[in-house]
Image: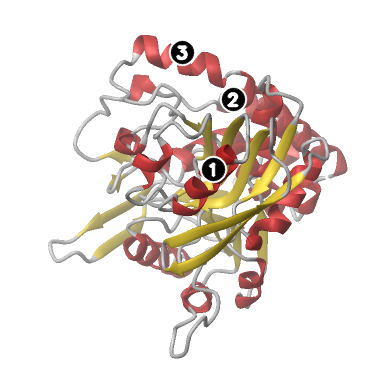
Amino acid sequence: MAATAAASRSSSLLLSRRHGASLSSSSSASRAGASRLRAPRCVLGTAEQLRVVEAGKPVGGADPWAAAWTPKTPAQEARLAALPQEARDSRLKIFSGTANRPLAQEIASYLGVDLGKILIKRFADGEIYVQLQESVRGCDVFLVQPTCSPVNENLMELFIMIDACRRASARSITVVIPYFGYARADRKAQGREAITAKLAANLLTEAGSDRVIVCDMHSAQALGYFDIPVDHIYGQPVILDYLASKTISKDLVVVSPDVGGVVRARAFAKKLSDAPLAIVDKRRQGHNLSEVMHLIGDVKGKVAIMVDDMIDTAGTITSGAALLKQEGAEAVYACCTHAVLSPPAIERLSGGIFEEVIVTNSILLPEDKCFPQLTVLSMANLVAETIWHVHRDGSVSSIFQ
């Protein structure tokens, strides 16, 4: 078991480095051979987002964008050949909802298994229909579904998928939620408000899930809302690997765009050669509105790397970057795990204030949300290693050590 875990960690690290090292060459190839892409650095495109899946095939014909992007994952045969015989467990089943099927396909390919066959469709009145098209009796089922926009549609789809697996006698049901919608509604900031993060956690439990794997929750206390085991993973290793592959000035400073993200930024700075830390102090005027007040720390003549868990309307991180430029920062990079990118985020991020905006594919970005400064990194290997450790009753925290 120890040898298998070590091999898995080594494979994960190697694959992550390959992701970072090959990103620029992949982008160049995309510019030359796929001029249809608006963003030369954007790894993922619109055509990968499928709202309806029938027997593992997209409805409406072949994908015209298929040549524009290929997952950076080892072939299934190579992965299977690397696994010991006892590790080839047919009880591992991975199914995907319609929110981010390309990520689920990458995860399945990395693990050397086929993505489970499932039929998901909408009736004329908008109701969702789900049918598993293969047996899951006695299996460990993993359902990959970020609850991104449209949040309520994707969340309800996940509930129905859980119910279908429970009624099909699955041994265990683990929901893999790369991006957890409603996570920001984790407390009562004013009277008579709902704590929707707790409600969503209760609904996932009542639907029949046995375990949750979630990536970079907005606040750690929301993990306590679940009455079932939760494995919280972080997208930082993927971003750190990519930054390590770039030739950035050694005079770095990690910046937290608000006081609430200091712990996250401090952990990031420690892993980035123990870089110094700066904090942007802001006062929020309302939902999705913020005002930058002043900067704590020194950024003059340095390369600033702003770190956050998500970028929604980009108001906080853009106004923070403008302040860093005023204070003499040489260049500003924005790093986050979840690219929500609600309007007017694209206009703000592509305005030229950022040298590069680095995100992961926890949320599938349509082509109209891509822009030249955007770089999308795959977190498939990280999620796949987590799934493997959970399935084999291994330690998830060992992946990040």
Q: Which mark is residue 74?
A: 2
Q: Which residue of the protein is positioned furthest toward the left in this rendering? A: 124
For residue 17, side relative to residue 100 (left or right):
right
Residue 365 position within the rendered picture, expressed as x and y whole percent measured from the top left: 39, 40
Q: Amino acid at mark 3?
A: Ser
**Which residue is located at x 59 percent, y 58 percent?**
214
- The residues tagged by marks 3 and 2 sit, at their Cα atoms, a distance apart of 21 Å
Q: Which mark is residue 129?
A: none
Mark 3–mark 2 contact, CB under 8 Å? no
Q: Secondary structure at mark 3?
A: helix
Which residue carries the number 1 mark?
Answer: 321
Q: Is residue 152 visible?
A: yes
Residue 121 position within the rendered picture, expressed as x and y whole percent measured from the top left: 25, 55
Residue 284 placed where, x, y %?
A: 49, 66
The local crowd at label 3, few if under 14, some if 14 to 19, many if 20 or more residues have their Cα within 10 Å, is few
Q: First in sequence: mark 3 or mark 1?
A: 3
Q: Please say if the residues under marks 2 and 1 sit with CB atoms less than 8 Å apart.
A: no
Name the residue located 61 percent from the left edge and 43 percent from the top edge. 306
